[in-house]
Image (tube, coloured by chain):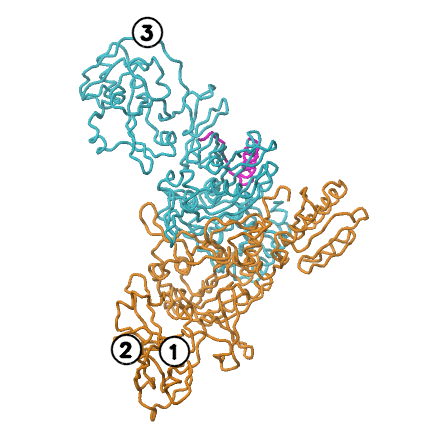
Chain colours: A cyan, B orange
Amino acid sequence: MSTLFLRTLRDDPADAEVPSHKLLLRAGYVRRVAPGVYSWLPLGLRVLRRVENVVREEMNRIGAQEISLPALLPREPYETTGRWTEYGDALFRLKDRRGADMLLGPTHEELFAQLVKGEYSSYKDLPVTLYQIQTKYRDEERPRAGILRGREFVMKDSYSFDLDEAGTKASYNAHREAYQAIFARLGVRYVIVAATSGAMGGSASEEFLAESEVGEDTYVRSPESGYAANVEAVVTPSPPAIPIEGQPEATVYETGSTPTIATLVDWANATLDRPVTAADTLKNVMVKVIVPGKEPEIVGVGVPGDREVDMKRLEASFEPSAVELLDEADFAANPFLVKGYIGPRGLIAHGVRYLVDPRVVDGTSWITGADEQGKHVVGLVAGRDFVADGTVEAAAIRDGDPSPDGTGTLVSARGIEIGHIFSLGQKYTDAFEVDVLGENGKPVRLIQGSYGVGVSRLVAVIAEQTHDEKGLCWPESVAPFDVHVVIANAKDPAIVAGAHELAADLDAWGREVLLDDRKASPGVKFKDAELLGTPYIVVVGRGFVDGLVEVRVRATGAVSEIPVADVRSALGAR
Amino acid sequence: MSTLFLRTLRDDPADAEVPSHKLLLRAGYVRRVAPGVYSWLPLGLRVLRRVENVVREEMNRIGAQEISLPALLPREPYETTGRWTEYGDALFRLKDRRGADMLLGPTHEELFAQLVKGEYSSYKDLPVTLYQIQTKYRDEERPRAGILRGREFVMKDSYSFDLDEAGTKASYNAHREAYQAIFARLGVRYVIVAATSGAMGGSASEEFLAESEVGEDTYVRSPESGYAANVEAVVTPSPPAIPIEGQPEATVYETGSTPTIATLVDWANATLDRPVTAADTLKNVMVKVIVPGKEPEIVGVGVPGDREVDMKRLEASFEPSAVELLDEADFAANPFLVKGYIGPRGLIAHGVRYLVDPRVVDGTSWITGADEQGKHVVGLVAGRDFVADGTVEAAAIRDGDPSPDGTGTLVSARGIEIGHIFSLGQKYTDAFEVDVLGENGKPVRLIQGSYGVGVSRLVAVIAEQTHDEKGLCWPESVAPFDVHVVIANAKDPAIVAGAHELAADLDAWGREVLLDDRKASPGVKFKDAELLGTPYIVVVGRGFVDGLVEVRVRATGAVSEIPVADVRSALGAR
């Protein structure tokens, strides 16, 4: 440690909020260079490489072959699939000296499809799974929490190519199991949840979410059934339709100043001869759907008034397009939108696409806007008085909602995406016509899968899940060193010599040893040792005159004084 | 091999000229994605990783510490040192979603200087050497020969920080020796030559050039003295000055149409009463020196008429500015420049900076242009009739030129730059005020060194130096596999089983084995084995019924039939 390029910080850095970020900075693992762009210092790089190796070993175990594609890529393949524009501002674009458009790869579906097309030509060549562990680039709108969500980051991405659905399923499951093995070896607590496919396209996908309160993803589970999904992927069950016949006619009322659901419910309870709750009202939220290079489309979203619109769910429904709420200028430009009094009939009459929550089935009767200042309509029946253009998943999911699989109710928690597996189908192989000659002599279009692990993010996730108030606390599988040997008194030659001897012995035994040979006080050294988070701390101090050293287990805090000769067995098998 | 992601090509690819490039493509090691941008397929990646590891081990051996900085960098540090503009078109620049200027790192002097400033504060912290093995980006004007000169490439760059000159020298020498160890282990034939510092700045530098006819660098050596230098770094010895007194006066002659040196020499020999050669004439070449963001400066370069101007030497003299010959438009805009008849007096009279070859010392007398159509001046004496603004290294170096160190004459050869070591002095530590508190309590400005190895380029260099007409031929230190086992007859179950058993045995012995278990003919397999270039090829074929296998040494072509039990000893210690 006297020569290691490492300086720990006593205080939390001002710009770090999440515990793992604070600690990785304080312990000198990473340093910020630009927003979402970090340097890996010696200890950080060691952890990153160990995480990489766990991922590599498990990928090799399922027969995936490692290659390495460039990060600097030409525009054309991404143009072919539409992702050059679909990615929007998240794509780093640049021009080379000849003016050619290039990009920094955010993910490589296109390139792998082209590569397989170039090398393989027969059904006999398949299946194949290729992977890389590589630096990727995404110009995140909100890079945050250091390496947890960076703009330059390390990812393992793999791609499977199969001849048929059975093969694709086998490749998907092999990855699912490999990921379970990876996260188990890394000691990460996680859940597997149903997910949306987003900008990736394709049919089915699941996410691996590390359990964490600082996570940006919310997922729900039904403990009774085992159902689990990212809230973005929850499909709201539709209730059965209700007979329309015999329902009272829709009636428009002067409701005075009732621009919010609460004021409307108050009016209804004061006026109508039945109890009304927010769930009886239909709230119409106006958004614009943005496709780069096109005029934004105004869309109306109708949800029961007791539900908020969850913008992340709404965005997921429109992926890869972006979605924004209308602003004042939009309302001004569309005077038929009477804010606070917007109703389905006005939207439909003006040709605005109108999508509703799946609970708005035929025969449901609503209190909603009448498209005039101070007026609402009561008894507006879906399927009779208006017909929506379709349904949309926009309403917020709440704890206690019925589980979509019909068993139990949902509870929610937060998580960090650490892995994602996709069945892409033929989206990319269609785009590049990736065919091989089939057994029957006819061309077979390949089916692609895509699978990602956030390698650098995992360093932060493990730090987040394992740290305590004293500092980092690495599992043995990824710790930067196996043992941290502290020379408690650097002025005592016997202690110094003994510590060096012990370190050399552990090194010869195959352990990575960090030796604190600095002239600092024991207090400073202990604090640093706890901050750095090596699993075992061996203190060579006063007891050494009697042949004793202190072994501290970082994770449990257990301390024992044992003979030097017993250190190996105290550290145990790895 | 039946499942390996590898397809060899029978024919040379059309767009490859250099042997290593052809072979790395044919043998399926790399694939092109864009000009100067390549993918590494399984075999190529294996070689790349092994080269990386040799470099890493030797860097660790000299106490350098591995870290990893981002490739995506903010503009500011490069703005501070001027390299944001100095790099010209070779720098990949881009903007992020908020409009901030960013770049893809071509080399990281700035970032390392800032990093050390951020972490270290005392003389006790020094010296320190940090390195990274990282993907770098340069938008080369002429990417060529595949991975030999790419726009995305892997480099090892290290940076030393020292308190004083003695420390800097020690760090420089440690790198020099580490590089010798690296290239020796890789089996590369190379020379160490004096070099220019170029865009890097700083005082001294040496290049490691791999000997190769396809190299872009020319270097010269004096076999008698051991002197060696990149031609760009050759300093022309100045002859002693000649007495001016008594030399005939300069006389302007009508020389008719004599716009070239040859026509001028013919005229002189026909007119003057002494023999004249091209070496008696002074050729004035007009160039413009380009600094981004500024008006180009016109400069006159005077060299003896028997020498060409070597644009690479001239460019090196003006680094980091770019240099171009004047074009027709430039001549039209400057009518005082009479093409073919330009002379020193006209240039100086018009305030044009005029630089001459170091051989143009005071008292030398020249036949040169008289700045009028059809006129030259004879007997124009340097130091009497004109005084140049300085000297410049522009004239081409020729075999047989005297060595600058005074011993012997120069011979030239071509090479590929594989390493470069620089004493940077305080260029970067001044820019960022990288000071630590000295032993005497006063701040000490650090001295930086910069050292690079072209890691991915080395893969091509080794291929270039070791290949033969049959294919690649890797040294054992970097071969993708140690042994290539060929099943000569995939239909004979005994042979198949025996080959698998042998492969498993070698694998258990710690060797990386490539087993050719394909259904192809023995001829195809032998050809592929030779093309792929594994050091040992073991053929399990007809002799196996008698317990014999054939061992072929790829490099020598030696073939021996030996008992299976002797294979381990035939492969030898590694």
Instruction: Residue B423: give x, y in percent of width and height.
Output: 44, 68
Q: Is residue A556 visible to us here?
A: no
Residue A174 among magenta residues: yes
Q: Which residues are magenta?
A: A169-195
Residue A378 within the segment the image draws in magenta: no
Decide if residue A150 is in sight here.
yes
Q: Secondary structure at mark 2?
A: strand
The front one of A471 and B425 is: B425
Where does label 3 land, which residue? A245
Residue B372: image tag: 2
Confirm whether circles 3 and 2 share one chain: no
The label on residue B263 is: 1
Q: Residues within 10 Å of mark 1 (few under 14, many from 20)?
A: some
Residue B9, labelled with which disc?
none
Image mark 3: chain: A
Image quadrant where one finds the C terminus of chain B: bottom right
Same chain for marks 3 and 1?
no
Q: Residue A240: image x %, image y %?
A: 40, 14
User: In front: mark 3 or mark 1?
Assistant: 1
Q: Compared to B447, does B267 lie above or below?
A: below
